[in-house]
Image (cartoon, rainbow, N blue to C red):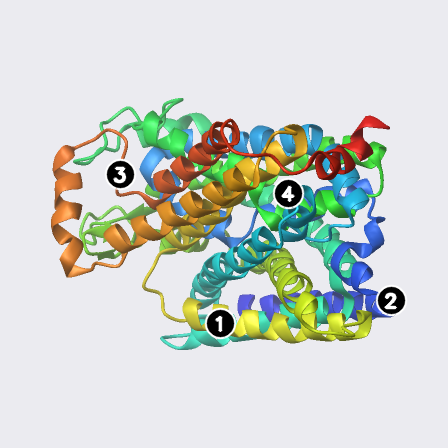
Amino acid sequence: MGSQAATFVILAIYITIMVSIGIYMSKRTKSSEDFMLGGRSVGSWLTAFSYGTTYFSAVVFIGYAGQFGWMYGASATWVGIGNAIIGSLIPFFLIGKRTRLMSNHLGAKTMPEFFEHRFDSKGLKTAAALIVFIFLIPYTASVYNGLSRLFGMVFDLGENGGTIIIIAMAVLSAIYVTLGGYKATALNDFFQGIIMLIGIGTVVALTVQRKDGLSAALDALNTISDNKTEAGTLGSIFGPDPINLLGVVILTSLGTWGLPQMVQKFYAIKDEQAIKKGAIISTFFAIVVAGGSYFMGGFVRLYCTLDASDGSGRAFIETVNGKPVYDTMVPALIHEALPNILIGLVVVLVLSASLSTLSSLVLTSSSTLTNDLIKPRIKNFDDKHQVLFMRILIAVFLIVSVIIASHKNASISTLMSYSWGALSGAFLGPFLYGLFMKKASKAAVAASMITGVGISVIHMLLFSFNIEAFSGIKQAVIDLNCPLSLLSPINAGAFSMIVSLLIVPIVSSFTKAPEKKVVDNAFSSLETK
């Protein structure tokens, strides 16, 4: 059996299991709360794996690992370590218990609904719901983009093949999410997480082995230099550019604290004991999957080159507007480093990572729009209608995402950076202080939402859309030669998160908090525990 045929067989088995889980869980989904949160009874293992598989997708494995591995070499591994500690371990212990108790007490099924009850404001709920729906779309598109890159390489699908794969993945993710809701997603996430752990370990081992072991691979990295990178830095501990590397760590780690699709895992977890166990499990998962992905990406320069005539035998990577096409680097590494028989494993690995993320994104988006925008405006909107609308919106959300993903004008990392920057820049401060700070005000939440979205949108217009009217501003920024790249959407996203953490306490200090009875009600669930 050829490698492509073997890959097809593996995919067929995988898809059959995914759909079967959706069908099985559809019989256990009785209400809108079951569909959105699994009845708030999900255990530690399912929650931890669901958290991890939602966190890491083709965006990390294909897009970020390739780009940051090329830019920072072996030091890109710090991003994975930051994801494990800052993005996984700390939020479980810091906000997990409070989120579960307060959201349950307030009857909040979504982050916008949490803002409504915590700050006594329907306006905040509406604004948050719109932000969630709009800015989850580019993230979803970035996941599809990563999938299409890998499948295009494996099956040599040609110009339109990527679009076919994107549509097929959208249909598959829609089927099992629509059938079974949150519990189907969590159960699939567990199965997919096992595949990811095995797959990442295998790929990392072979990547280093093909270059004669870790020591030899690091030595080889240290011999590489170009006009932006000095020899001896790509194999070093902190790499050639530790300042901008820190921006990547902040964006991809701190951002999870304010992302609705991540925080929602704590709404659904069963009890406090499950949170403690889940913290350990999710941290181990992140170390292996994220740490392994970025570590593997650190060696892409040993497998890829920008010079087609250098005679090294490495895969040639094209450039567009003077920049390498980063999204093709990891597929090229896989093609060079892995035997054909294992490429099928990698395809299922990336598919598992991506479908788990996609399922959480579409479920979060559709449930938010239905629960927070449509339900309050329609009379007699019972559970049956609510689940039906969520299923319809899943299809709408996926169609829009597919359209964006089919036009590869933006890189995977750019799409994700603007999505995470806007979402976490809008919600990180409001959600975190909403859990801990009684004096947090509605005005402060609104200010954070405006600045978080504003920073991302303004940066997008100035530096990513190539609008002629803004070319002078862009050139002026380039001429500054600032050590912290102001052109980077990653740094813009990290900046918006930091602003969110600062703006909420500052604005709250001179604006009115919600009425005492509203605040006391929200915090009463914590004081009795």
Q: Which residue is mark 4?
A: 119
Residue at x-position 77% and y-position 61%: 184
SS at circle 1: helix
Q: Which residue is mark 2?
A: 30
Upstream in sequence: badge 3 or badge 1: 1
Above or below — where is 396 with respect to 490?
A: below
Spatial separation of the CA atoms under disc 2 and disc 4: 30 Å
Upstream in sequence: badge 4 or badge 1: 4
SS at circle 2: loop
Residue 19 appears left or right of 141: right
Which image quarter is the N terminus in?
bottom right
Spatial separation of the CA atoms under disc 4 and disc 3: 34 Å
Which image quarter is the C terminus in?
top right
Q: Position of residue 514 (x, y in %)?
A: 64, 38
Q: Position of residue 429 (x, y in %)?
A: 54, 36
Q: Please name the amino acid that badge 4 sits on.
A: Phe
Q: Please name the amino acid that badge 1 sits on.
A: Val
SS at circle 3: loop
Question: Quick check: marks 2 and 1 in contact, CB under 8 Å?
Answer: no
Spatial separation of the CA atoms under disc 2 and disc 3: 49 Å
Residue 247 appears left or right of 310: right
Residue at x-position 79% and y-position 58%: 183
The disc at residue 486 is 3
Spatial separation of the CA atoms under disc 4 and disc 1: 32 Å
Q: Is residue 170 visible?
A: yes
